[in-house]
Amino acid sequence: MVWGDYVVERIFSSPVINILNRSLDVAELRQKVIADNIANVDTPGFKRREVIFEQKLRQALEEKNSGSLPLKTTNSRHINVNAAVSLKNVEPEIKILNGRTFRNDGNNVDIDVETAEMSKNKILYDALAQSMTNELRLLRIAISGRR
């Protein structure tokens, strides 16, 4: 391996970039699950599904940081850059929600809830994409020494 390749590999494997990359993938998966829920709004017996990821990520970050001095953050939603947690063990889970059936056909999909979740997910995806762009911009500035 050439020294330059090593540096590039280390730069693009930073904890922040890894978390943003995985979160973007999960947002894409969530969009597909929500679209599937909407597509099956009139399918008798269909049960709503949702993606569980953020809780698992938070738990992995908290476990990693127990017993160490974390970087001071000003908001609980900040990503702790000391958290070199392996994301290999943090996988999204698609959970089938069997409760709250309001219809006689057993379907529990509420189109209004799904539409709101889709909008929320799009906002999250856009924010993650912007954060990734900012991280890459900072790397470019650091490498080139100019804006």
Image: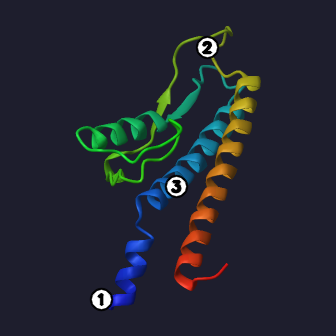
Mark 2 or 1, nearer chain start: 1
Instruction: Name the image quarter holding the C terminus.
Output: bottom right
Mark closer to the observer (3, 2): 3
x then y, percent, for residue 38? 71, 33
Does residue 94 appear left or right of residue 126 in this picture?
left
Residue identified by numbered label 3: 20
As drawn, 52 above or below 122:
above
| Mark 3–mark 1 distance (CA, rounded to whole Å) | 26 Å
Going 69% across and 51% down the picture, which residue do you hit?
Answer: 126
Q: Amino acid at mark 1?
A: Met
The type of residue carrying mark 3 is: Leu
Q: Residue furthest left?
A: 67
Distance Cα–Cα, label 2 vs label 1: 58 Å
Q: Report the amino acid beneath label 2.
A: Gly
Pick whichever, 107 or 29, lies toward us: 29
Under tag 3, what secondary structure?
A: helix
Mark 3 and 2 residues: CB-CB less than 8 Å, in contact? no
Q: Which mark is residue 32?
A: none
Please tell me in which quadrant of the rendered image residue 4 appears.
bottom left
Q: CA distance from mark 3 to mark 2?
A: 37 Å
Mark 2, Cα crowd under 10 Å, few <14 / some 14-19 / many 20+, is some
Q: Are marks 3 and 1 in contact (CB under 8 Å)?
A: no
Give the mark nearest the N terminus, 3 or 2.
3
Mark 1 lies on residue: 1
Residue 146 appears left or right of 93: right
Residue 20 percent location from the top left of the image: 52, 55
